[in-house]
Image (spheres, helix red, strand yellow):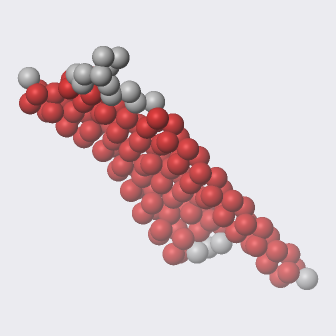
Amino acid sequence: MNKNKITNSNKNKNKMSKYAKKAIMILTTVMCIVAMANITAFAATGQVNTTDFINKTVTVLTSVISLIGAGLAIWGVVNLIEGYGGDNAAAKSQGMKQLMAGLGLVLVGLVVVPVLGNMMTSAMK
């Protein structure tokens, strides 16, 4: 009887973690689409100002890469919690890898992309 309660509890946790992962994926996708939809690269006259274009592109890339990294990091935290809850070493390992990869993507989005944007802007002058 007690074993059935534990099994049902684990099944409920697995269902909840699957729903959490789906919600994270959908939310990250929607936020990336919104960030990309907010860019306007062309002026009202139809001419392209390269500096403005590069600055807006850097802003969008920073947002998108950071959002994807944050989504991956949150997904990793969910896997970590799932792994610790079920004493599953594989889920803990995968969760830690996803968390570190997500944090690395956020760091790339916040540090590397603006530096590359500054390099492109100075090269266009």
Q: Is residue 123 left or right of residue 45?
A: left
Q: Is residue 55 visible?
A: no
Residue 17 image position (x, y, % from top left): 67, 62
Quadrant containing the N terminus in the rendered view: bottom right
Give the answer, above or below, for where 26 lies relative to 12: above
Tell me the residue at 85%/81% (across/down): 4
Give the answer, above or below, for where 90 lies relative to 53: below
Give the answer, above or below, for where 64 lies relative to 74: above
Quadrant containing the C terminus in the rendered view: top left
Residue 3 image position (x, y, % from top left): 83, 82
Question: Viewer-proximal residue, 42 or 82?
Answer: 42
- Seen as rendered, the residue at the extreme right is 1
Q: Is residue 66 left or right of residue 1?
A: left
Question: Viewer-proximal residue, 98 or 118?
Answer: 118
Residue 11 image position (x, y, % from top left): 76, 73
Could you say which quadrant of the image residue 40 lies in?
top left
Tell me the residue at 55%/44% (across/down): 30
